[in-house]
Image (cartoon, helix red, strand yellow):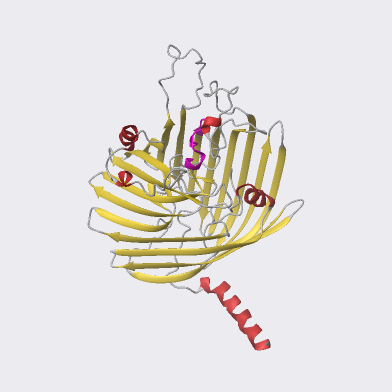
Amino acid sequence: MRLKGMRRLFKLIFFIISPFFVNGQISTFQIGTNRLFLKSFTDIITSSVSDTSPHISIGPRLFGVSSLSDNQTSSSFLLGTSLSANIRNKIIFTSTYDYLGGNHNLLIHDYQDSLGVFPGFDLENKRWKLNLRYKLNKFITVDFGKGKHFTGNGYRSLLLSSEHSTYPYFKLTTEFGRVKYYNLYAAFLDIQNSKQNRKKYASFHFLDFQLTHNINIGVFEGVLWQAKDENYNRGYDVEYLNPIIFYRPVEFSKNSPDNVLIGASFSAKFDKTILYGQILLDDLNIARQKDRDENYTGGFFQNKFAYQLGVKSSFNAVNALIEYNQAQPYTYAHKESMQSYTHMNQALAHPLGANFKEVVAFADYRKDKWRFNFKLTVARVGLDSANTHYGQNIFASDFEAQGDGEEYSYGNFNGQGVLTQIKTVQTEVAYSLKGFDVFGSVYYKKKKSDLVDQTSLWYSLGIRTFPFSAFTDY
């Protein structure tokens, strides 16, 4: 019995220290958690792989942090493994598996209690990402696996983000000249009903065109639908497999009830500074005008859109970003609540849902093995009180919009409902050793409205082999 105990202890020690001795270990510190240098359409699992030479490598993933506040101590740890294989740059396979455990802080407990999942994980605090990439020819690349994607050049994305759980997908990338064209087919889950997981599918197009050497524009569209309803099992609609046609004509021709979103993005580079932005249109009902509808008062609930404007720059050893995001009430929601732009009780775009305005500021400084960063988010969100629906909750049907019991809701504006200010501040100091970082951080969050006034302050110390945070910034 004593020998078995010693063997178990040796295995545990070896697992913890082995990251420091693994050759060819994948480093994800290049992009960090701020995503300052991601391309316009990024597969999150493969974006961090910098070694393009033929290889096979495997290594453990480790994150551990202890945090202290006035009324609680918490500790979180993540244990996982990563695998990467490159076969003649023709076939590239990447995979990670993570298990998250520990006594998490109160903010994460509240998140889990309300949504049933840990941010970015599955129901059981586990996540598995994999991607198999095959370069069909010099123009077309095929990817499939389980992961998530990020569309845009900023810290947030209002088109397709990566703050949620992983999902199965199939992706085609076509490149010719100045054009990159992406087709993404994915499967999501609606888990609002705890007794069953209801499947829904999505199809996305994203066209990225390099207008000049320094200016890029992008066109985005996506459609999401439920796999089955009360009448029949629909499955994956083959009409949405068409890699070229725009979805709006298909929608009108079939009088479809599906959730369609369209958008655009741009970026302009000036030396080491990039100006970027996005706009998303969910619904835009211009038919209801004052001369056609005697009840018209403006602020029609189906005029749903979001936009982003940001700038990021690099100078010396400093990376900096400032970004503004806004989403109108009921954006990303749908008449059929299951067809909302969500997955596993998490938003597929901005994690705040809708009915908000937000400013994000970020600065990162590196010198030798030291790294210092500062992040500030300030958001004004219109939340719901009991038995109301003012547009922030994208899981609810937008046809339940607050509006004096009428079928249609007018007079809506950004921040309606219980106007709430959410501010987060995170500062961090990290020192890189061979294969891992030691870091210390301070996290502050204040949430204030007429109904609530909450303040949290946490001091943390930890180690990691890849970027991860035990706190949210929304």
- Dividing the picture into quarters, in which one does residue 126 lie? bottom right
Question: In the rendered view of the protein, which quadrant contains the C terminus?
Answer: top right
Picture coordinates of residue 377 (x, y %)?
A: 58, 40
Picture coordinates of residue 310 (x, y %)?
A: 46, 36
Q: Does residue 168 belong to the magenta stretch? A: no
- Dividing the picture into quarters, in which one does residue 376 lie? top right
Picture coordinates of residue 205 (x, y %)?
A: 34, 43
Apparent side of residue 357 relative to residue 211 in the rendered image (left or right): right
Relative depth, front residue between 384 and 323? 384
Picture coordinates of residue 33 (x, y %)?
A: 51, 52
Is residue 324 shown above or below 186?
above
Relative depth, front residue between 168 and 175? 168
Task: Give the overall secondary structure of the magenta segment.
Answer: loop
Residue 40 shows up from this direction = no
Is residue 151 shown above or below 253?
below
Magenta span of residues: 326-340
Question: In the rendered view of the protein, which quadrant contains the N terminus?
Answer: bottom right
